Image (cartoon, rainbow, N blue to C red):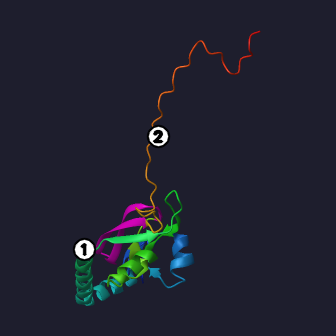
Amino acid sequence: MKIILKEDVMNLGFKDDVVEVKNGYARNYLIPTGKAIMASPSALKVLAENLRQRAHKIAKIKGDAEAVAETMKGVALTISAKTDKFGTIYGSVGSSQIAEELAKLGHEVDRKIIKVANIKELGHYTAIVQLHKEVAVEIPVEVISENAPKQEEAPAVEEAPVMEEAPAAQEEAPAEDAPAAE
């Protein structure tokens, strides 16, 4: 079934997109919640006219999104997370933590437009900030342990003490454990 989206729907499309979905998804969720309408011929004509009239507004919104994308191009995030002694993260790092770190750097971004895999291990990842349907910014994210041992606390590798060679046992002396001969 073809529908016209009335708002952005994650993993489906953006506002005013015409998309094909299964009948049940459209009739039971998208249309009753007001997220979409059926794409009838008259609705498609109305959509085309609205898009033509709003073309300059859409271009301005896209230009604003590109300007924000330019300011975010050099941003790299380092997020610290609590880990166990093996380096496994308690919980996970998601879009809300990335949005908080961006806010600390002066980039106010809604967490809903940040696409990132569920991060459960330490390492390097890439988050995608979808500012507009045609403008996205990739941000490198490094997840480190906040309770990693510091260099003063790190156990030093000690060398095993060198054992001196034991003197060879003399053959004339009887063994201590052996019974004495009479």
Decide: is 40 above or below 165: below
Percent across and percent down for residue 53 are: 26, 90
The disc label shown at residue 73, or none: 1
Task: Report which residue position mark 2 lands on.
Answer: 161
Crowd class of label 1 (few under 14; some 14 to 19; many from 20; radius 10 Å): few
Is residue 40 visible to the viewer in this orientation of the structure?
no
Reply yes or no: does residue 169 show up in magenta.
no
Q: Quadrant of residue 91?
A: bottom right
Which residue: 27% across, 86% down?
61
Q: Secondary structure at mark 2?
A: loop
Q: Give the magenta part as a residue range.
A: 118-144
Percent across and percent down for residue 13 are: 39, 74
Q: Earlier in the sequence, mark 1 or mark 2?
A: 1
- Disc 2 marks which amino acid? Pro
Which residue: 38% across, 80% down?
41
The disc label shown at residue 32, or none: none
Decide: is 168 above or below 23: above
Q: Residue at the far right: name it.
A: 182
Viewer-proximal residue among 52 and 98: 98
Q: Secondary structure at mark 1?
A: loop
